[in-house]
Amino acid sequence: MKGEYCVGSASFLSFVALMLLIFVHVGQINTSTVPYGIAMAKVNMSGFGQALSTGVVKFDPVLGLYTNNYTSPLGEQNGLRQFYQFGLYSYCAFVNSSAGTCTNHTVADRFEPYIAITSDMLQNYTQYSFGFFGDTTFGNSDYLGNNAVVAYYFILLGTIFATIALLTGVARRAILFFISTAMSIMAALFILIGAAIWTSIVKKCESVNTQDIASGVLSGIVVSYGNGIYLTWAAFACLAASIAPYMISCCTFR
Ligand SMILES: *[C@@H]1O[C@H](CO)[C@@H](O)[C@H](O)[C@H]1NC(C)=O
Ligand SMILES: *[C@@H]1O[C@H](CO)[C@@H](O)[C@H](O)[C@H]1NC(C)=O
Ligand SMILES: *[C@@H]1O[C@H](CO)[C@@H](O)[C@H](O)[C@H]1NC(C)=O
Ligand SMILES: *[C@@H]1O[C@H](CO)[C@@H](O)[C@H](O)[C@H]1NC(C)=O
């Protein structure tokens, strides 16, 4: 392949990877009133109230567990929301398919779904939730939070390396092609690790989907992958595919 085509395809792949990664980052920086953006993990709490009233609080209808006020702040026992979405910088919670609110943005936000939901419930419900989820991965906020922070920094560094690969790859200098090859390898590796950690922690959380909270009564909580995980994997694929053309340009084109 001629050098121009080679470096062109490598740059194109790095560019696509970088765009995908920017979406993964920016998806949660969006502060519009409808921030139904890009998340790494989703938690559907719709069935939990029903599960609680059939399995646990049998005599007592579960009143006041959920809130319909989509503007009320999260984490202040204002009531549970139907859907939660966790991203790299914040989490958002929705009372229906479109209306919701997000927490303030923090760098390397911890993925702690159990804390997120229990801090929205009124005090008299949290006593129940502790019993069911205390020993599960879903309830292990230290483990999930720490892994999400580590994964965040891998994704952040991978994004920086991908940017350097893209920028150094466009100049016609052998030494810069060497740098872009090295950076594309590092970027692919870091994004791979970040994506793998997120995939693994969400996968482990999914065990709550089939957990009983009373005999024969499922938790009613549905954890699933957010689209941010798929975008991260797609970015990895692009970065991995860009390595060979960068390498060829590095050796043959100056
Ligand atoms: C949430 O879970 C309930 C069952 O618990 C299901 O009926 C509903 O379709 C789910 N909603 C979304 C948006 O996934
Ligand atoms: C919803 O929550 C916000 C913020 O706490 C509050 O100002 C507002 O009055 C609430 N709305 C209703 C209808 O309760
Ligand atoms: C969601 O809730 C908001 C506020 O309560 C409401 O304005 C909106 O119409 C609802 N959307 C849907 C799809 O139900
Ligand atoms: C979130 O940010 C707003 C505005 O910057 C601030 O008033 C509020 O106290 C913050 N909330 C938390 C929980 O830090």
Image (spheres, grey):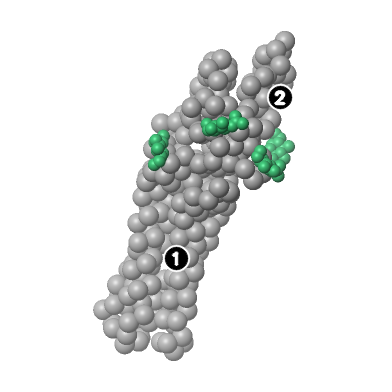
In-front residue for pair 127/100:
100
Which residue does the image show at 44% across and 65% down from the upper left? Answer: 18
Residue 16: x and y in percent read 49, 69
Q: Label 1 near label 2: C-beta < 8 Å?
A: no
Whether residue 229 is visible here, answered yes or no, is: no
Residue 128: x and y in percent read 57, 16
Residue 224: x and y in percent read 60, 42
Residue 163: x and y in percent read 37, 67
Q: Secondary structure at mark 2?
A: helix
Question: Is ligand 1 closer than 8 angstroms to the Cβ of mark 2?
Answer: yes
Most extreme residue toward the top, as rendered?
59
Does label 2 or label 1 sit earlier along the sequence? Answer: 1
Say which mark, if any, is on residue 50: 2
Q: Secondary structure at mark 1?
A: helix
In-front residue for pair 43/60:
60
Which residue does the image show at 64% across and 45% down from the upper left? Answer: 98
Quadrant housing the C terminus:
bottom left
Number of numbered discs visible in the structure rendering: 2
Say which mark, if any, is on residue 250: none
Label 2 vs label 1: CA separation? 43 Å
- Above or below, 47 against 177 in this view is above
Task: Give the labeled residue for mark 1.
Answer: 18
- Above or below, 199 against 23 in this view is above
Which residue does the image show at 50% across and 34% down from the upper left? Answer: 73
Amino acid identity at mark 2: Gln
Amino acid identity at mark 1: Leu
